[in-house]
Amino acid sequence: MNDIDAWVWWLVGAAALGIPLVVTAMPEFGMLAVGAIAAAAAAGVGFGAVSQVLVFVAVSVALIAVVRPIANRHRSQRPQLATGVDALRGKQAVVLERVDGSGGRIKLAGEVWSARALDGDQSYEPGQQVDVVDIEGATAIVM
């Protein structure tokens, strides 16, 4: 065991930290693995054991302190690209069959949708442009 250089042990440690990273999907293990790789580089250059440990700790702590808040901020933001039903809200549609509080049909994003007016007293005639306010199931709410 004494024949193996310290940098090899650091690389083994980095690989060992990569296993829980893959299994648990906790990015902190990846940051610790990068710290172990930095310590392996320090060992390869010729730094002593204390310096290697300090490099490992400094790089790991720096990565966790910098990357983790950024990742948490990105995780809490809503996606900027609206998809599905969210992408249809605010779009314009053309009335195909009279739309009122009880129902009707519109052409929205190239598809025929059932629709009803947001205001039950309002009605829209065929050919008229309407705005999609919401989607409830398979029915567009328009105004």
Image (cartoon, rainbow, N blue to C red):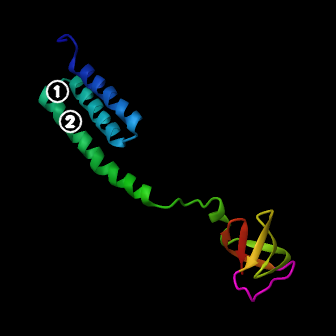
Marks 1 and 2, Cα distance to the nearest angstrom?
A: 10 Å
Give the left or right position of residue 59, taking residue 111 as reference: left
- Residue 22 location, quadrant: top left
- Residue 104 location, quadrant: bottom right
Give the left or right position of residue 76, taking residue 129 as reference: left
Q: Residue placed at 46% from the left, 61% from the top?
A: 77
Secondary element type, mark 1 = loop
Q: Amino acid at mark 2?
A: Val
Q: Is residue 123 above or below residue 79?
A: below
Give the image location of residue 139, x and y in percent: 73, 69
Q: Are marks 1 and 2 in contact (CB under 8 Å)?
A: yes
Q: Residue placed at 30% from the left, 24% from the top?
A: 11
Q: Which mark is residue 47?
A: 1
Q: Amino acid at mark 1?
A: Phe
Q: Residues within 10 Å of mark 1 (few under 14, many from 20)?
A: some
Quarter of the figure that contains the C terminus: bottom right
